[in-house]
Amino acid sequence: MSAGAAASSLAEGAANTDAQTLRDAIHAGVNAGVQAVLQEVSSRRGEADAAVEAATLACAQMRASAEEEATQMRAVAWEEVTQMGVKAREEAAQVGAEAREEAARMTEGAQAGIEELRNEARAARDAVEAEKASMEQAHTFQRNKIALNVGGHRFKTSLQTLTSVPDSYFGSLFSGRFEQHPDAEGVYFIDRDGTHFRHILNHLRDPGSFTLSPAMPYERRAEIIMEFQFYGLLDRVMPYYGLEHIGVSLLKQACTAGTKHALQAAVAQARALAVEMGSTTPWLIEEFQDTRYLITEVVINDVPVWVEEDGTWSMYLSVDNTLWISDIDMCAKGEASGYINHPQEFADSMAPTMLPSTGWMSNDTATLASKYASAGGTDETPWVDVPAMRVTAVHGLPDDEPAMAAALRQLAALT
């Protein structure tokens, strides 16, 4: 082998040796790194396992603690529920006992009430039977004729006539509730003045047509009124007689005042204690047509108030010195407001009956709708003329009544 080839061979061998050494070194380094990583991973795994074990232990402890607390809470709750149940049963038992006691009392009271009602019903039935028996006994009186001796005046009439007004003197006398003692001839004596008794019988025989004539002298009229009052018939014969004391009072006050105007007003008002109003042709609605107004002791703006019989409407002097028909509230205030009005100053008239029949006005509340429309009534012109109004006195004091006569004499002396 030549020297060059040998040198070349040596160089190649050396190179191969160095490469192997480098590979071994790299391999050893890699193995060492891998081992280190594996050791680190193993160490970390151990820590993780320890943490997991610790967490598992802690969870077990917490679960055990929670279960113990829950067991205690269930025990406490059950005890409370048990106590509440016991208390509720005790209260329910007490309420039940009270309810039973109250029901027993109510039942006892109801039974007592029922028994009382039964007793009342029996008493009422017995009273009815007794009344029937009395009525039967009453009919045993002379059925066709009754003979009366009234203060020495003899009268004969029928039982039906005498008892035609049940709540009158004779209605009670012959009801059977009172024992009767006719004389030997079967005549019943009544200790009253018999002079005017024929008027009593005439009214009982024909109550629809009998009236006391206004032309009758006052003294005689007063005597007859006294007899009607005794026999319980005055309200039927003279339903407005109770107003006369108002007229007398007005006249006496006027006589005391002594002025011509006061006397004229009192005389006019005393002659119109009860008045009837209505249109002479169909014009006013039913509530205002043919209504009667009665004088009262109420005074508004120095003039008495007349009130409709049913108490719905009032007729009064307003603050503007004209006569109005309105409701009670407006009347109390004396307001110039209402449903029917006469614009003439009332001071010159003094009583409703002295106002002229023309000049009356009505609004839509008091007027028939067709008449109101035909007369041109609107919201802008709410008042329409009533063609003619009828105002008639149906009851008043006669001129020979003492207070009226005195006022008329005093008035005559002033003219």
Image (cartoon, rainbow, N blue to C red):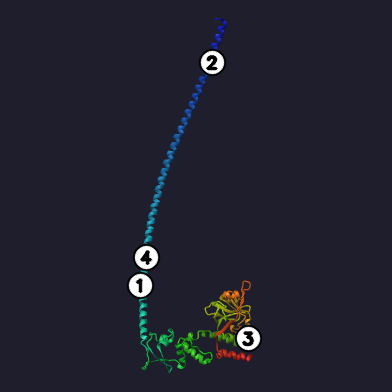
Q: Residue at x 58, y 90 (%)?
A: 406
Q: Earlier in the sequence, mark 2 or mark 4?
A: 2
The disc labelled 1 sits on which kind of residue?
Glu
**Residue position marked by numbered label 2 in the rendering:** 19
* Mark 1 to mark 4 CA distance (whole Å): 18 Å
Q: Nearer the viewer, residue 231 or 77?
A: 231
**Residue position marked by numbered label 4 in the rendering:** 103
Label 3 Cα crowd, 10 Å radius (few <14 / some 14-19 / many 20+): some
* Mark 4 to mark 3 CA distance (whole Å): 76 Å
**Residue position marked by numbered label 3 in the rendering:** 261
- Numbered disc 3: secondary structure: helix
Q: Earlier in the sequence, mark 2 or mark 1?
A: 2
* Mark 2 to mark 3 CA distance (whole Å): 163 Å
**Residue position marked by numbered label 1 in the rendering:** 115
Which quadrant is the C terminus positioned in?
Answer: bottom right
- Numbered disc 2: secondary structure: helix
Task: List x then y, in percent, for residue 182.
Answer: 37, 91
The disc labelled 4 sits on which kind of residue?
Ala
- Numbered disc 4: secondary structure: helix
* Mark 2 to mark 1 CA distance (whole Å): 137 Å
Front of the two marks 2 and 4: 2
- Numbered disc 1: secondary structure: helix
Q: Nearer the viewer, residue 185 or 34?
A: 185
Task: List x then y, in percent, for residue 135.
Answer: 37, 84
The disc labelled 2 sits on which kind of residue?
Ala
* Mark 2 to mark 4 CA distance (whole Å): 120 Å
Instruction: Decide: is 5 above or below 241.
Output: above
Q: Earlier in the sequence, mark 4 or mark 3?
A: 4
Label 2 Cα crowd, 10 Å radius (few <14 / some 14-19 / many 20+): few
* Mark 1 to mark 3 CA distance (whole Å): 70 Å
Q: Earlier in the sequence, mark 1 or mark 3?
A: 1
